[in-house]
Image (cartoon, helix red, strand yellow):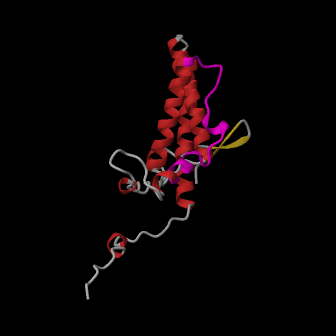
Amino acid sequence: MPPVSTSHGKPYVEAERHDELSEGVPADAQASAGEERTADGKLLPGARTVPSMGGKATKGSTKLSHRIDSLALTETYRNRARTFRRVTCSELARTVGGGVCGIIPSLFVRHASIATALADMALDAGHTDKAVRYAEASRMHLMYAREVCAKDAAARPRAPVDPLAKWRNVAPPKVDE
């Protein structure tokens, strides 16, 4: 459980220290879809692996947690923030989220992306005090995102893994009688 501090008479939750972060759950290995494609890359009839990935791509995304359209950012910084959000959510999903970066961690990453872009803008304009505040806000949002992503992954039920499943599903050879 993250530490709770008091400021101005009100309690607030702090992110875990960098050396006390939760372990998280690594993502499962991606399923191979090579046998579901023709030599030129088209999907064969009855393919299931690749089409199922399309639905998973938009599952659990909302405009508030995934879109960065802030008018406070210039187009250049907005594009940088979008790239940062996309890459950071992918990394969180792969390293601690068990392959998933949920809506709440995505929202924290979105706020961190905007704060990072604002920090860069302030630094470029020569406002170092603003840049430091935005950078600190970004760091806190990223710490919260990682913490929530790891806790979500730990709470999510996982299917048991059978290391011999690949060899058990092999059909026995047919014997001619």
Q: Is residue 8 above or below residue 59?
A: above
Question: Where's residue 19, x and y in %?
Answer: 44, 46
Q: Is residue 24 above or below residue 130?
A: below
Res. 132 visible in picture: no
Q: Is residue 58 magenta?
A: yes
| Observer-nearest of 3 and 24 | 24
Res. 7 visible in picture: yes
71 vs 81, left or right, is: right
- Residue stretch rendered in magenta on the structure: 52-75
Question: Where's residue 58, x and y in %?
Answer: 58, 45
Can you say which quadrant of the picture contains the C terminus? bottom left
Can you say which quadrant of the picture contains the N terminus? bottom right
Question: Where's residue 26, x and y in %?
Answer: 43, 54
Q: Residue at x 65, y 20 (%)?
A: 71
Q: Residue at x 58, y 50 (%)?
A: 2
| Observer-nearest of 30 and 52 | 52
Q: Residue at x 58, y 19 (%)?
A: 130
Name of the residue lying farthest toward the bottom? 177
Name of the residue lying farthest toward the left? 176
Q: Can you tell which quarter of the image residue 174 is in?
A: bottom left
| Observer-nearest of 21 and 8 | 21
| Observer-nearest of 26 and 176 | 176
Q: Residue at x 58, y 27 (%)?
A: 115
Q: Can you tell which quarter of the image residue 91 is in?
A: top left
Q: Is residue 110 magenta?
A: no
Q: Is residue 115 above or below residue 55?
A: above
Question: Where's residue 40, x and y in %?
Answer: 35, 44
Name of the residue lying farthest toward the top? 125
Q: How many marks?
A: 0
23 vs 3, left or right, is: left
Name of the residue lying farthest toward the right? 9
